[in-house]
Image (cartoon, rainbow, N blue to C red):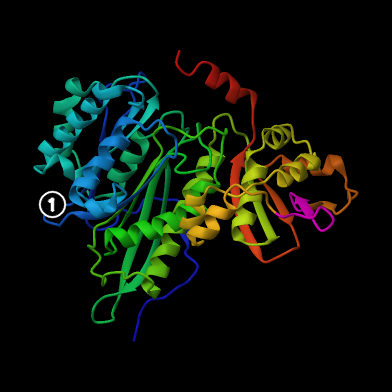
Amino acid sequence: MSMTVRLTPTVSDTVVMPLGFWAGAATMGIKASGHPDVAMVAVAEGLPDAAVAAVYTTNAVLAAPIIVSQGHLAQNTPDGGGRFGRTRGVICTAGCANAATGPDGEEDQRLLACAMAEGLDIDATRTLALSTGLIGTRLPARRIYGQVADLARAGLGDSASDLAAAADAMRTTDSRAKVASVKLELPDTAGTAKWVTVTGIAKGVGMMHPRMATMLSILMTDAQAEPVVLHELLQRATVQTWDQLTVDGDTSTNDTVFLLASGASGCSPVLPGSTAADSLGDAIGAVARSLARQQAADGEGATTLISCTVMGALDDAEARAVARSVVGSSLVKAAFHGRDPNWGRIVAAAGNARLADAAILVAAGMGEEEATRRAGSPVRLDVATLRVRLCGVEVFAGVPRGFDREALRRLMDVPEATVELDLAIGQGRGEAWGCDLSERYVRENSEYST
């Protein structure tokens, strides 16, 4: 009898280190602030390589860490096309994006891969990379080579504090680290339930917009699964979480999410289409959702998280499109910053909604032919049946609704403001997250490189 239990995952915004991993961080002088700027996650000594899946930015300008990581995965798992394979660990450098730096930038990234590999006594192609910071700057790869090797050799540990240090070192303009964990039970070969952990760390509060990945994240689990299974689960989680996150309308050159599985929990291999895969996918999605919400709440200059829920759409893809359009509207974002209950901007944003790209629709489970046909098409919406609630107050139901404007302004002055739309034409549901647009965002980004 299967011992797999599928329940709504309970997420903890705390660090729990999954079995089979080490982590650590160090200060190597990449950030001008002098704060920790190199993070590392690796498979524990004595264990086989972890299965890994990746989702990358759709920006045509790919940063050197993405190019190198894709190359490494393609070498060790050719059928993965750089999207999944095997790895011993990930290095993240913060303070320099290493994007638009040409062949020299790629060589810098390969040099750091060699440094990490030297410290772990592995082949460099078993490493993956993330970078974040200013575009067009070079990594001081030769200067920090020895420090990277030392971190990999003797600076990693298996405690929650070691992983927390890695999450902190990934930050640039983030005011705080982003972490989330879920515990679930999966069966071993004898049918006995084993505790499994899914934990994620992430950074990113600006230059973030749907079309994946909108930031950097390392997800880790001690479940056992093949790389191709992880990739399917990660893609589906991404569609419902990070593809529904926006801060400022700009998709970065470096956005990457890695999902690593050590298999150290002792559970049976998670097979595609199984109940165990459903449970693991739910846990991955719950962690990703928590991280995405944390990122939106900490958006550069943000004073409030905007959480938009859409129901009654023709299908989930159209519901997600409406939610994305609402939280991505600069007019809506500005209104929330001023605590202005200008619901007309919400209605207008909903009317502008268009479906996602075909690749995102396919990742969500839509057939390729239908996805190609519907990609970018306008959402079906009838204003006569549309209902809008702002912070719990109905402001529109086919026609304007009367409400106390000053009272609603006070309701909007909260850490998380909600928008609910009911299209009343189907069963589709979706959600998205953004933040208000503030003067501080403009000031911070007008001086970013200086």
- Report the predominant secondary structure element of the magenta stretch: loop
For image coordinates 85% across by 56% down, the residue present is 384
Q: Is residue 345 above or below residue 423?
A: above
Q: Which residue is mark 1?
A: 45
Residue situated in front as seen by the camera: 312 or 152: 312
Residue situated in front as seen by the camera: 266 or 168: 266
Q: Is residue 90 above or below residue 78?
A: above
| Residue 312 position in % (x across, y down) | 70, 62
Left or right: where 278 falls relative to 166: right
Q: Is residue 353 magenta?
A: no
Region of the chain picked out in magenta, as a range: 380-392
Left or right: where 122 falls relative to 263: left
> If the image is split into quadrants, where does the N terminus sit?
bottom left
| Residue 113 position in % (x across, y down) | 19, 35
Q: Secondary structure at mark 1?
A: loop
Q: Is residue 384 magenta?
A: yes
Residue situated in front as seen by the camera: 162 or 269: 269
Q: Is residue 426 above or below residue 308?
A: below
Name the image quarter holding residue 318: bottom right
| Residue 273 position in % (x across, y down) | 39, 72
For image coordinates 61% across by 53% down, the residue present is 320
Residue situated in front as seen by the camera: 446 or 300: 446
